[in-house]
Image (cartoon, rainbow, N blue to C red):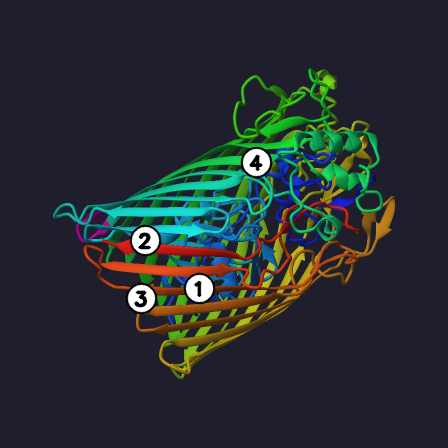
Amino acid sequence: MGRYLLSGVALIGLLVSPTRAASTTHKTHPHHANHARTTTPAHRALPTHKHATVASGTEDMTVHAQRRGSHSAVEVVTRETMDHFVAGTSPMQILALTTPGANFASDDAFGLDTVANTLYVRGFNQTQLGVSLDGIPMGGQGFHNWNGLGVDQMEIQENITSLTMSQGAGALDTPSAQTLGGAITFTSADPSDKAGGQISQLFGSYNGFRTFGRVDSGKLNSSGTKFYAAYARTDQDLWKGYGDQQEQQANFKLVQPVGDRGKITAVFDYSNFEQYNYLSLTKNMWQKMGRNTTYLKPNYALAKEYAYYAQNGGVPAGLEGVLSNDEIGDYAYDGTQTQRNYLSAITGEFQLFPNVTSKTIAYAHVSNGDYSATNPFLTSPTSQVPMAMETGHPDVRRLGFVQNFDIHAGHNNDIKTGIWYENDRFNYPMMMYEDGVDTPHSSISNFKNGTTWWADSFNTNTFQFYLQDTYHIIPGMTVEAGFRSLLQTTHGGTSVDNTSTLSSWGVYYSHPASGNLTAANAFLPHFNFDYHFLNQHEVYFDIAENMRAYDYSAQSSSGSPWSGLGSAANPAQTVFDENKKSLRPERTWNYVVGYRFNSHFFSGSADFYHTDYYNRLAAITSGSTGNTYSAFMNVGRETMNGADVAGTFRPLPGLAITNSFSWNDATYEDTHLPYNGGYVSIKGKQQVYYPKFMYKADVSYTWHRATFNFNTTYTSARQMTYTNDEQIPAYWTSNLNVAYDFGKVGFAQNLKTSFGITNLYNQNYIGGVYGAASVAGDDNANLFVAAPREFFGTIAAQF
């Protein structure tokens, strides 16, 4: 059962979320540690980065409700566009459905399942993008919120006024330590000047139920004090298997003007996501066992039978030649997670001088949760049941501040400069809870009296400085140049390891390692040229160098310098110390050139981009279940070329027809990848998990008070392995939404009803992907089947 895998952030630009992928040293599913494969249930759950950067110096202009107006290599998704989709749909999903070059996939219709969600923008995954909300750093967007906070767990969708995506070479002013490519910036709504409120209620398939309510205070006094408070709850049964997914969110925002010199804004956001998970599958499991294959709950007897075979070899009767023993081990009884987040921030924006403005942000983010999964490779000592509940109880505390200055110097220069500092503390204890002879331990409660297997602790300090100047050469023509400096130091690792005293649980080597690493670069340049001419035309190009700081995650995962290293014969600490001598942070050089045309009847754009990756880092794992060995190393380069072409026709008032085509040729350069005791060349092989071709069509029509929207997306085959010997099949997916606004009805100012259908043609396809890719073969259970056709109806009103 040897395994030779490369983790997500690993291998030359593999672009699998470093921690998403990181959480898979061996083929594991999100919550369950596939055998002793250095990954335990909750580690799949480990964090992922996602960063968003906003191209500095950009100006957003709305061209049409359905297409976004843009400046330079920036696209904007408006509030009106988001309203064309089912209420509560993840903004990331809407971004991908309406924007060329972006790809989002999941296993639920709303796109809220944090395990399966997979976002790529021009080859970069969600862990390699910079992300911010109103200037607040959002850090990682992954499953575990180890260094950030996903947008779906922070801001209620209805409170987001716009989503800006920089598909260019990056942005200097975005506070992010993981950006290798583009950036995503979210803007939230300010409280209304007039007292009022909003309410909406959704009903849908699989007992889908979503309630949203918001109350605006209006201006409370002569100084203009105003606030709003909003709450949303989304609840839906799993479309296959046992359980449901519940998401609760609350937003509070207060704005206090300070005369005519500026304003102070205070926000508090809360979320509680309690989700039963869908089982991640191998391609063979999907094809042989069907799209409804998932966790074995509530069949406890069957789960114990599968666990017996997983530990002792063989497969249950009737599955000979259908599933391998490894795939039997990929099944588990249960997998869940509960994620709780609290975000507070105070922002001060002031006009210091006629030509100088200041924006100061102080923020604090606290996150904790319970990430549980049945582990069929442990044994409950008292009952001797061949499995046990394994739960990670991470807690995160991020504290930081951002200080920016905008300076108008003379007639032609706009200077921007600023700093960002953040301290991130991450703790991850791994606990084990016994399963009984007849009943299992609950996966969502009763986390008392557990047994500590091990615990990890990290502390990270990040500092960033940037300086840029936008020079207006002539009307419509600007050139922008600047740089940023980034320094991040992380120290920590294993703080507790009880492996040697827990033999009765059947534990295996846990890969403990600790130490510190620093990523630093004093000069990361960015250059942009933009020229608007003849009123309707624009040309631009972007060049930037980016660096991504090191990931850190629990020892049982892979894909970081601290994770899944070594073996009992070659201790993880020894491997870490040796790696430290040669590891360097990942870097990219990004180049973008584009053209855009806008008129009343037609809007079109064409972009070409090129990326060179350097110091691609990979976790390469080999060995058997009880004797796995991993190393973390620089495995070479990756080269990416791509193009996006999009056009929107408006032949009739209210009608917009958009078509876009995307091509991406990302290939690895490594010719000596360690594999199976030797080396294999992957030079020229296509990047894993990102499609080479995408086609998107969107038709939007507004007639009086009625709105119709249809969109469809073709996604070509995605490579599953680094040798490209296995593929995730291509697929089409479509959505239909219709709405009618009744206007003022009684005391409601606007009464609106809408009806939506997701996966309109009920396609059976693989959506999200979580975890590391194999070098070769259908070796990893990391594929999630997309949700089937679902129906949703919503009624909403404003007061």
The residue beneath circle 1 is 737
Q: Earlier in the sequence, mark 2 or mark 3?
A: 2
Please, what is the three-letter code of the amino acid marked with disc 4? Thr
Q: Neighbour class for label 3 at 10 Å: few (<14), some, many (≥20)?
A: few
Mark pair 3, 1: CA separation? 50 Å
Callout in the foreground (1, 4): 1
Q: Secondary structure at mark 2?
A: loop
Query: Which quadrant would residue 510 be assigned to in this image?
Result: top right
The residue beneath circle 2 is 189
Q: Earlier in the sequence, mark 2 or mark 4?
A: 2
Please, what is the three-letter code of the amino acid marked with disc 1? Asn
Q: Residue at x 38, y 55 (%)?
A: 794
Q: Secondary structure at mark 3?
A: loop
Residue 256 in the magenta stretch? The answer is yes
Q: Is residue 762 visible?
A: yes
**Region rendered in magenta:** 254-262
Tell me if residue 554 comes above or below residue 550 in the rendering. above
Please, what is the three-letter code of the amino acid marked with disc 3? Gly
Q: Neighbour class for label 4 at 10 Å: few (<14), some, many (≥20)?
A: many
Residue 410 numbered tag: 3
Q: Neighbour class for label 1 at 10 Å: few (<14), some, many (≥20)?
A: many
Mark pair 2, 1: CA separation? 24 Å
The residue beneath circle 4 is 336
Tally of marks? 4
Q: Earlier in the sequence, mark 3 or mark 1?
A: 3
Q: In terms of secondary structure, what is the magenta stretch mainly?
A: strand
Q: Position of residue 158 (x, y in %)?
A: 36, 53
